[in-house]
Image: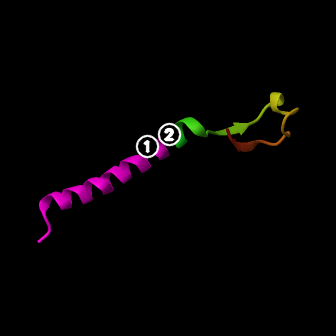
Amino acid sequence: MVPFSSIIKEVWKDVFFVVKAYCVLHVTENYLNTLVKTEGASMLPTIDSTPSMFLC
């Protein structure tokens, strides 16, 4: 029979991995990229006259 502490260590390792993955996704989504729509006359010199989507 497997000791109870061994099971807890294994579960804790899996939970910790999920929490780290969530943190990476949260930081990436909220602080590293943003989807923006470009439109209007101020964007003409930089991009083009048709609306476009960009990751910033």
Q: Position of residue 21 (x, y in %)?
A: 43, 50
Q: Are the residues at dot 2 and dot 1 in contact (C-beta closer than 8 Å)?
A: yes
Q: Is residue 8 magenta?
A: yes
Is 21 left or right of 8, judged from the image as shown?
A: right
Q: Amino acid at mark 1?
A: Cys
**Magenta stretch, overall SS:** helix
The N terminus is located in which quarter?
bottom left
At mark 2, the secondary structure is helix
Is the residue marked by circle 1 packed among few (<14), some (14-19), or many (20+) residues within 10 Å?
Answer: few
Residue located at (33% from left, 50% from top): 16
Q: Is residue 19 magenta?
A: yes
Residue located at (50% from left, 39% from top): 27
The C terminus is located in which quarter?
top right
Is 7 left or right of 54, judged from the image as shown?
A: left
At mark 1, the secondary structure is helix
Q: Position of residue 41 (x, y in %)?
A: 83, 29
Whether 5 is drawn above or below 22: the answer is: below
Residue located at (61% from left, 40% from top): 33
Q: Which residues fall within the magenta stretch? A: 1-26
Whether 24 is drawn above or below 9: the answer is: above
Q: Position of residue 23 (x, y in %)?
A: 43, 43
Nearest to the observer: residue 38 or residue 17: 17
**Marks 2 and 1, how far apart at CA:** 6 Å
Disc number for residue 27: 2
Which residue is label 1 attached to? Answer: 23
Whether 35 is drawn above or below 15: the answer is: above
